[in-house]
Amino acid sequence: MKFNQSNKQNQRISRISETTLVIGTDIAKHNHVVRAFNYRGIELGKRCLFQNDENGLLNLLAWAESIKQEHGLTDVLLGVEPTGHYWFPLFHFLKQYGVEVVLVNPHHVKKSKELDDNLPTKNDIKDAKVVAKLVIDGRYTQPQLPEGVYADLRVLMNQRDRLCGDLNRVKGRIHNWLDRFFPEYTQVFKDWEGKASLITLQHFPLPQDVIAAGETTVVAIWKKNDVKRAVGPKRAELLYRKAQKSIGLTEGAMAAKHELAMYLEQYAMLCRQIEQWYDYMNSDEAYHTPAWPSPGLTDVSGSWDIDATKGKFVAEATVTALVKGIPLGWTIYDVSDIY
């Protein structure tokens, strides 16, 4: 039976036949609950509780197989309400055993949990039934998790996004700190992330620290840490004058210094980790792992031309690679002025 693309729900419903065992699963961190139904929504057997480990998942398979044999069913469709990341191991394990896993929208589960008992209560056993009924109605989606090189790319990009997000949050906290305790600081250092600025914040974070140390000591600390450009006695004098007239908070100074020190340590660590991420992406190690095409497997072809009417150099290169039998390809364009 064929359906057009706009009638996906009918396709999903037709997937469930008289010989299909539909299983609803409530996912948790350590323990899962499943209930089994036939294509008409009649519950089969008793519910099964199993742990999130190999033995627990094997018990799930044995339980499903016993129900299949008892009722003359041939295939299994297991529905899951995706709770965070806890369903990933279950999905990959069952996929190895040929069990199809589908996802239902948690919002649909929340909206339809009152259909049977008119109660807004929520528990594992009830949710497993609600998930199964949604699957029977064709209200599910099939997960498309990346594999091979694409899985590696997903992990790496998620890692980069987390690092950049954490770095932006730490930068915001440092801005917040400066606004409270040394609001004039950015009048001295336009970019507080510069080398001289970071050294200053490490040694003289508060205005009273700058005043106590004096201009000469500040310049000496800069030179000691190999800061030779853009800062000198004039910058130290400006910093000293701003510190003398600062309107920053003076209460809680000791705790404030400790707070800034932690922020600067986090900032340095995240910058280092992001740099390590880029180093890895550009390293031979990355290109020789199964996740990346080896230079020997990569084919590069292209063409170039000069557009005399516009005075531009136009180049196009196509790069192709075969990694674990997966063809990858991308095109690079470059347009440059030549006069």
Image: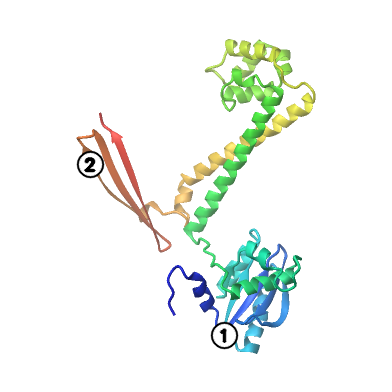
Instruction: Note whether 213 is above or below 122 in the view shown.
Output: above
Instruction: Kindly tell me whether residue 82 is visible in this rendering.
Output: no
Image coords of residue 177 (percent x, y):
69, 28
Give the residue displayed 50% in from the left and 53% down from the top. 153
Number of the label disc, if any, that sits on residue 107: none
SS for callout 2: strand
Front residue of 112 and 287: 112
SS for callout 1: loop
Image coords of residue 129 (percent x, y):
69, 73
Give the residue displayed 67% in from the left and 25% down from the top. 179
Mark 2 to mark 1 CA distance (whole Å): 63 Å
Q: How many marks?
A: 2
Instruction: Note whether 39 is above or below 8 in the view shown.
Output: below
Instruction: Note whether 36 is above or below 233 in the view shown.
Output: below
Q: Which residue is mark 2?
A: 305
Q: Which residue is mark 1?
A: 18
- Three-letter amino acid code at the position of disc 2: Asp
For marks 2 and 1 on the same chain, the one whose residue lies earlier in the sequence = 1
Give the residue displayed 55% in from the left and 53% down from the top. 155
- Three-letter amino acid code at the position of disc 1: Glu
Image coords of residue 173 (percent x, y):
67, 33
Mark 1 residue crowding within 10 angstroms, few (<14) / some (14–19) / many (20+):
few
Which of the image's four quarters has the N terminus? bottom left
Q: Nearer the viewer, mark 2 or mark 1?
A: 1
